[in-house]
Image (cartoon, grey):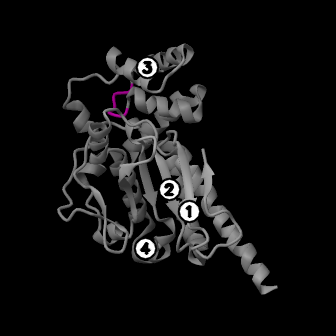
Amino acid sequence: MGSKIRYLFETCLIVIFVYYSSAMSDNQIPSQLAPAVSDKLSTTSNNNGTASSNDNNTAVPNATTATSATTVDPWSEPMLVKTMQLWELSVLDQQKLRSLQTKLADVKHAWNTPEVVLGFALTTGWETAEAKFRTMIQWRLDNDVDSLLTNYQPNRLMLDNSPIAFLKDYDREGDPIYVERGGAIDVKGMLNRFSKEELMRHAIWLREVHGNGEWVKEYERRQGRECRHVTVVYDLQGLNRQHLNPSVLGFFIEFMQITEDYYPGPIKVNTDMRCVDSGVTGLDWNARFS
């Protein structure tokens, strides 16, 4: 009886984690759907296999400053056509994107670009894209998100316990690979050390960094094209009962909601691996989501 209860518990745990990790990857904004600013904080792997930053922690320009410094209009005809061709939009969808351009002309913000607006349209629907986009802009203004890349100074302990990175090389189709070791993150310990607000600010900063990283330019240089899709890998090794702690689940769900609402964008494939190694049994270790 005890083994059956444990099996059901562990199965419930992995289902919850896979569900929310899938929801995040389905709505995470890929690099090309974010303003084209670069950061000097590259993510590498340390001896323990976790992600860490460069020692200099160099600040990066914020999206608003970077965009205002350039004379290129993101909605200019060449830029608009480039976006349409990249995403192979139908004639009807091209007309819809142009319509959104007109409707959002009053929004003076660095994130008002064809790529970001299209990200909302492709994930939330053309009918709701305008409202969702405006809500996102207001959220950024209300929470001073635009200043994160310039003013936020990441805590070293938080960085060392954020095992996430883009791999140096790409998948078989030449697309970038994002890896997150969700099972290795001690969220409960971090919540005991830092306030939820501090951790949430850090998590949002990471989302900004990975959407605007130096790796974007490196990818375009090596591949000779812009990034359209991203392969996401979630390593579940280490997933255990602490991840079902109410405070941990509450934090995780809240951040997933932020990702879904304010960082939309299509992901090519999401792979969850090493479920067996995590101690959770009875499920396919290589669950795939499109």
Name the residue type under label 1. Answer: Met
Asked whether disc 4 touches disc 3, contact meaning CB atoms under 8 Å apart, the reply is no
Relative to the observer, which residue lies in front, 35 or 78? Answer: 78
Eye-nearest disc, 1 or 3? 1
Q: Categorize mark 1 by other alpha carbons within 10 Å: few (<14), some (14-19), many (20+).
A: some
Instruction: Give whichever of discs 2 and 4 has the lower sequence position.
Output: 4
Name the residue type under label 3. Answer: Gln
Asked whether disc 3 touches disc 2, contact meaning CB atoms under 8 Å apart, the reply is no
Res. 44 image quadrant: bottom left
Name the residue type under label 4. Answer: Met
In what element is the residue under mark 2? strand
Vertical comparison of 238 with 106: above or below = below
Instruction: Give whichever of discs 2 and 1 has the lower sequence position.
Output: 2
User: Image check: 96 left or right of 176?
Assistant: right
Which mark, by number, is residue 190?
4
Q: What is the C-alpha distance between the residues marked 2 and 1?
A: 7 Å
Q: Categorize mark 4 by other alpha carbons within 10 Å: few (<14), some (14-19), many (20+).
A: some
Q: What is the C-alpha distance between the residues marked 1 and 4?
A: 24 Å
Asked whether disc 2 touches disc 4, contact meaning CB atoms under 8 Å apart, the reply is no
Is residue 109 one of those drawn in magenta?
Answer: yes
The residue that label 3 is drawn on is: 101
Name the residue type under label 2. Answer: Val
Q: What is the C-alpha distance between the residues marked 2 and 4?
A: 23 Å
User: Image check: 42 left or right of 196?
Assistant: left
Residue 234 position, x and y percent, is 51, 59
Magenta segment, prevailing SS (helix, strand or loop): loop
In what element is the residue under mark 4? helix
Instruction: Give whichever of discs 3 and 2 has the lower sequence position.
Output: 3
Q: Which residues are magenta?
A: 107-111
User: Image check: 134 left or right of 72?
Assistant: right
Res. 74 image quadrant: top left
Q: In this view, which residue lies farthest toward the bottom?
A: 2
